[in-house]
Amino acid sequence: MAEATGSNHTIRALTEIRKRILSGELAGGERLFEVPLAEMLNISRTPVREAMSRLAEEGLLERAKSTGFAVRAFGVEDVIDAIELRGVLEGTAARLAAERGADPELLAQMTEVVERLDACFRDDSVDFEIYSRGNEDFHRILTRLSGSKIIEWELDRVVHLPFASPSAFLPDKVNLQSRQSSLVFAQAQHREILAAIKAREGSRAEALAREHARTARRDLEEAMKKKGEAGQLPGLALVVT
């Protein structure tokens, strides 16, 4: 029972600290210490220590030169590199899925997801909730289709970096209409990636998946233009120019 409680406290600390980092409440370069954070969250120091170690593995924190941790600040080039790295890993996942032969059950799941995504485009509108969930499902299944635990582990680590997640640049409900065409294009890429994997076209699947991830670079440029505005993307406060 005590072990389960400790795990719950670690998850709570991890979630709360990550949220405060991505919101900008804990700014890039700010030093973090166990005692103040434990008092703020009203938990013991041990789960806070474990949470900060995990956030350092994710790349949101870095170990300070003396003691404790500091919130990482990211340059625009760092974000571009993170997006590029996700593209490389997802491209490799798509190529391996095509060349090795994808698991039929997972392939059926991806087919169902793509069909579900197609159905959310109706009457010149997009069901944002369905698209958002379906997009996450597509990329999760793509990772598993590789059949490589190493790629799964590395992608799980990379997507926790600011803006490297496949859903990082999805428009909110306010900006949905102006971004609808980009969602239509992204969905077309989903269909082509799936088709290439089914056809065992490794090189084509890899190229499509990498290009699909690279569209986030254009979205980053638009996001940086709006930095500081109300409703900016989570994590944008960590990006310095």
Image: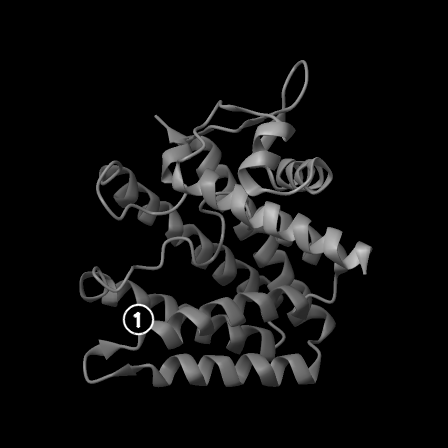
Secondary element at image label 1 = helix
The residue lying at 43 percent from left, 29 percent from top is 27
Assess disc 1: are there few (<14), some (14-19) or many (≥20) residues with their C-alpha within 10 Å of its C-alpha: some
Figure coloring: one colour
Picture coordinates of residue 137, whole percent (x, y): 53, 71
- For the N terminus, the quadrant is bottom right
Q: Quadrant of residue 221?
A: top left
For residue 159, above or below residue 183: above
Q: Quadrant of the C terminus?
A: top left
Q: The disc labelled 1 sits on which kind of residue? A: Val
Q: Is residue 9 above or below residue 46?
A: below
Residue at the spot 64% in from the left edge and 30% down from the top edge: 34
208 to the left or right of 89: left
Q: x, y percentage for residue 86? A: 55, 50
Any part of residue 84 in sight: no
Q: What is the x, y in percent for residue 29?
A: 49, 22
Q: Position of residue 126 (x, y in %)?
A: 27, 76
Q: What is the number of callouts on the image?
A: 1
The residue labelled by disc 1 is 184
Q: Residue at (66%, 70%) from the top-left corner? A: 145
Q: Residue at 32% of width from left, 47% of height from top?
A: 218
Q: Is residue 4 left or right of residue 64?
A: right
Q: Is residue 121 visible?
A: yes
Residue 65 image-quadrant placement: top right
Of the pair 229 and 151, the residue shown nearer to us: 229
Q: For this rendering, which residue is in front, 17 or 115?
A: 17
